[in-house]
Image (spheres, rainbow, N blue to C red):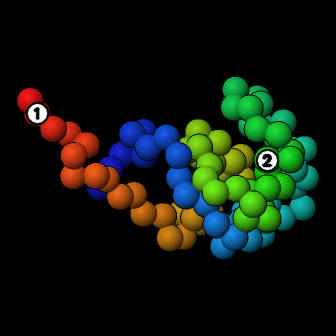
Amino acid sequence: MVPLDWVVMLAWNKECGNSLRLLRGKKSRREIADALLSQKVECSQEYIRKLENGEAASVSTKIITAIAKTLGVELIEIMSDLRVEVSKNICTSS
């Protein structure tokens, strides 16, 4: 298992977007964006819209973990198929 701290970006798709939209519920995108800003994470309402519509190909772990925290859910609830693949060459010795 790879620690999430080691991952910078995660692949995103429409299924993740649908989950995010459902979990957001009645909270507005502005409320989410403002809550992220209070966590010192910059994310626009427009980017949240793109995530929800599956228009983004990837998302930073910083943004999606901040969104999960704001919604009071676990990351796996947003990204049910979360898997991290690591190249065999990631840690090589010389």
| Foreground residue among 35 and 55 | 55
Specify which label sits upstream in the sequence, 2 or 1.
2
Which residue is the site of mark 1? Answer: 93
Residue 60 percent location from the top left of the image: 59, 43
| Foreground residue among 59 and 21 | 59
Could one spot residue 69 in this view of the protein? no
Left of 83 or right of it: where is 44? right
The residue drawn where x is 61% and y is 53% is 58
Q: Residue 73, located in which quarter of the rendered image?
A: bottom right
Residue type at numbered disc 2: Tyr
Which residue is the site of mark 2? Answer: 47
- Quarter of the picture containing the N terminus is bottom left
The residue drawn where x is 44% and y is 43% is 7
User: Does residue 93 sit above or below 54 in this rendering?
Assistant: above
Separation (CA) of disc 2 from disc 1: 39 Å
Residue type at numbered disc 1: Ser
The residue drawn where x is 20% and y is 40% is 91
- Quarter of the picture containing the C terminus is top left
**For discs 2 and 1, the disc positioned in front in the rendered view:** 1
The secondary element bearing badge 1 is classed as: loop
Residue 14 percent location from the top left of the image: 69, 70
User: Does residue 45 sit above or below 24 in this rendering?
Assistant: above
For label 2, count other residues whose C-alpha is less than 10 Å away and answer few (under 14), some (14-19) or many (20+). some
Residue 83 percent location from the top left of the image: 42, 63
User: Does residue 41 sit above or below 28 in this rendering?
Assistant: above
User: Does residue 55 sit above or below 89 in this rendering?
Assistant: below
The residue drawn where x is 90% and y is 61% is 26
